[in-house]
Image: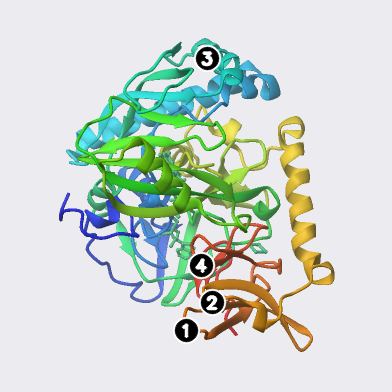
Amino acid sequence: MENKYTEKSKSIWSMTTHLPPRNPLPGDLTVEAAVIGAGMAGILTAYLLQKQGIDVIVLEADQVASGQTKNTTAKITSQHGIIYQDLIKKLGKQKARTYALANEAAIRAYGEIIGEEKIECGFERLPSYLYTREPSMVVRLEQEAQAASALGIPAHFTQIHGLPFDTMGAVCFEGQAQFHPLAFLKHLSQKVTVYEGTRVLKVKKHMIWTDHGTVNAKHVVFASHYPFVNLPGMFFARQHQDRSYVLCLDHPDQLDGMFYSEDKDGLSLRWTHGALLLGGNSHRTGKNRTGGEYQRLKQAAKQYYPDSRIVARWSAQDCMPHDDIPFIGRYSVFRPFWYVATGFKKWGMTSSMLSAMIIRDQICGLQNPYARLFCPQRFHVRASLPSLLADMGESAISLTKGAFHLPLRAADLKEGHGGIIRIGFKRYACYKDEKGVLHKTSARCPHLGCELEWNPAEKTWDCPCHGSRFDYDGRLIDNPAQKGNAF
Ligand SMILES: Cc1cc2nc3c(=O)[nH]c(=O)nc-3n(C[C@H](O)[C@H](O)[C@H](O)COP(=O)(O)OP(=O)(O)OC[C@H]3O[C@@H](n4cnc5c(N)ncnc54)[C@H](O)[C@@H]3O)c2cc1C
Ligand code: FES
């Protein structure tokens, strides 16, 4: 870990790691496997493939770990909120057990790689606690502890101490882990061929077109966070994105565990080298019209850690699959040589490792005990239906919004605010800056045409359909869109 904490508004991981830049694709290439995206999923997949002797490259539009991975809280855990009792109910005990064992195997795999490669990334094993402050939730957490334990996870319900507020108890998973994700990726990415600044523009069968040349690959892995090829696969119809916010406090006292809560306004906490990460305020991307996410975290920080200084803040988002299970494996029956790793629902450390293990085995023709559960072609009607209907409703509203929603007049837009404004017959996404200058971009998302929403917490335009994001001048921030919405 380099530097000391000096800046705000970027993650503590980015502030303490310098990742040496890599060259773009030098021209046309033919390889055995091409991985699109150099986040946690892409680098791990390339690393494991290379260990099997596969000739693999990684194509990265920006830089290693420049996507969601740089803004994670980096808990490596099979404790993914309240999940095991629900998986048992919806999918049965066998599938729930596979989910548990797969994620526990992913934790062990991190330990093995870090040990083998001697990576200094602050990897440490410690318990993870899912706590509640609400009396009505205690029974549900007790049931979660029983369900997880019955599936083979070392889990129990317990009372916790060491947090600056009272809780009603927590589900404890023993032997979980945390680390510095960029220190880890800095080391691992040096082991594989990565072409940075190389955006993939189009993929057709084995041919990949980038802005720096073409790649012909026997196997193509989409580790781009959100798979951006809409057909086949249709991942846009099977997941949406949720955002969350993090504050980093100067805090010398170590926490003896990682903490998470599903209560309304519940906080996620973990400690790293003199810094405490405080996370929360999750919402569907494009659905925070009133904003105040950082403000609420700041209030919590002031209340619970009055002597601590805020040294950084950041946010990130992740893909939320309808049935709560990531999509890992073959992209589509029509493209058996394409693979995908997405839908990590904010638990992408274990899911990235699992993706790497499953995709490596599929490319190498090996059996993988977890592949079937995560198969992207599955459809679990009972587990998927409620989220599927909600997403369809959200898309319908966003696509037809122009017909029903009255736009603002430019004169009514306050300085420092954004809104949809009609100019002539067209609707525009407009932001009026502090000097009164109007920044005008298209109100339509270039992905599939939904109307964008203003995100006052971050001064961005966010798409409620599938989560693409743009700055107020229309530059692309987050996919699945692959270009900005500026004119
Ligand atoms: C606030 C927050 C906290 C979280 N905390 C945790 C946690 O504690 N534990 C945990 O397990 N998970 C956590 N997660 C989830 C985890 O951070 C993510 O699931 C994970 O980082 C995703 O990694 P990825 O490699 O799939 O995506 P990314 O890191 O986004 O990587 C995708 C890469 O693909 C590149 N790319 C995209 N399109 C193209 C293209 N066309 N051509 C070339 N490259 C392209 C991007 O530039 C990017 O670098 C958290 C998520 C959030 C939102
Ligand atoms: S992200 Fe799909 S329409 Fe905007």
| Dot 1 crowding, Cα within 10 Å, few <14, some 14–19, many 20+ | few
Q: Separation of disc 4 and disc 2 at Cα?
A: 12 Å
Q: Answer whether labels 2 and 3 touch (C-beta < 8 Å).
A: no
Callout 3: SS: loop
Q: Which residue is mark 1?
A: 435
Q: Answer whether labels 1 and 2 touch (C-beta < 8 Å).
A: yes
Q: Residue at x 54, y 33 (%)?
A: 371
Task: Tell me if 68 is positioned left or right of 339 in this view.
Answer: left
Mark 2 residue type: Glu
Q: Residue extending furthest bottom?
A: 424
Question: Which dot, 4 or 2, sits closer to the camera?
Answer: 2
Q: Answer whether labels 4 and 2 touch (C-beta < 8 Å).
A: no
Q: Answer whether labels 4 and 1 touch (C-beta < 8 Å).
A: no
Callout 4: SS: loop
Mark 3 residue type: Leu
Task: Tell me if 275 is positioned left or right of 466 in this view.
Answer: left
**Which of marks 3 and 1 precedes in the sequence?**
3
Q: Which residue is mark 2?
A: 415
Callout 2: SS: loop
Q: Separation of disc 1 and disc 2 at Cα?
A: 7 Å
Q: Separation of disc 4 and disc 1 at Cα?
A: 15 Å
**Which of marks 2 and 4 precedes in the sequence?**
2
**Which of marks 3 and 2 precedes in the sequence?**
3
Q: Which residue is mark 3?
A: 151
Q: Quadrant of the C terminus?
A: bottom right
Give the quarter of the image for residue 84: top right
The front one of 6 and 204 is 6
Where residue 459 is drawn, which disc sits there?
Answer: 4
Q: Separation of disc 1 and disc 3 at Cα?
A: 59 Å
| Ligand 1 lies under 8 Å from the Cβ of mark 3 | no
